[in-house]
Every structure is written in structure tokens, then in C-alpha cells.
Image (cartoon, grey):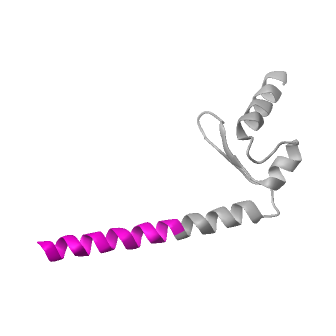
Amino acid sequence: LQQRLLQVQQSLERDHMRLRQAEARYRMLFDRSGEAMVIAEAGSGRIREINPPAAALVGALPSSAKAVTALFAAEDRDT
């Protein structure tokens, strides 16, 4: 039983490390891409993330996803 618990713990640690590596690769690609990228919730349209080129297109800071969401919501009301 103790051996099995150790194997499970080691497996969980490996999976966690792989997840962290995948997240780091995603973050690097997202942040360093020259293409504008926006991650939005499908149902609400709420913007979760915006990379620097996308922020530059709308004149916002990448950390201001809330402001960008509000900007797009205002544009939708105007049309």
C-alpha cells in the first residue's frame, strides 16, 4: 500500500510539472506573438486575456482585459 501511494504521489508530481511546463510555453507564445490574440468567454463575450499586439490595436494595456471587454460591449451597443 505504501509503495502504491508513493507511485501515485510521484505520478501526480510529474503531471503537475508537465502542466506547469505547458502553461509556461503557452504564456510565452501568447505574450511574445506578433499576432493579435484575445481569449474570450464564448457565452458572455468577457475577455479573459489580451496580448500586447491586440492591446495596441485597441489602445489598451494588456493587463486591462476588463476595459477592453467594456470597449467591445460599448461598440456592440452603438451598432
> Can you give x and y, in whole percent of width and height, for residue 23 in the image?
56, 63
Position of residue 57 relative to residue 77, above or below, is: below
Find the magenta span and give its range: 1-20
Type of secondary structure dominating the magenta stretch? helix
Seen from the viewer's position, the closer of residues 2 and 72 is 2
Q: As drawn, which residue projects farthest toward the top?
A: 77
Question: Within the magenta stretch, is there residue 59?
Answer: no
Q: As drawn, which residue projects farthest toward the left?
A: 1
Question: Within the magenta stretch, is there residue 9?
Answer: yes
Q: Quadrant of residue 73?
A: top right
> Which part of the image, by quadrant, shows the N terminus?
bottom left
Position of residue 67 relative to residue 24, above or below, is: above
> Which part of the image, by quadrant, shows the C terminus?
top right
Give the residue drawn at x 86%, y 42%: 58
Q: Quadrant of residue 65?
A: top right
> Can you give x and y, in whole percent of width and height, for residue 26 in the image?
63, 64
Left or right, residue 74 beside residue 8:
right
Seen from the viewer's position, the closer of residues 13 and 38 is 13
Give the residue drawn at x 77%, y 64%: 33
Give the residue drawn at x 16%, y 77%: 3
Left or right, residue 1 beside residue 41:
left
> Can you give x and y, in whole percent of width and height, for residue 24 in the image?
60, 66
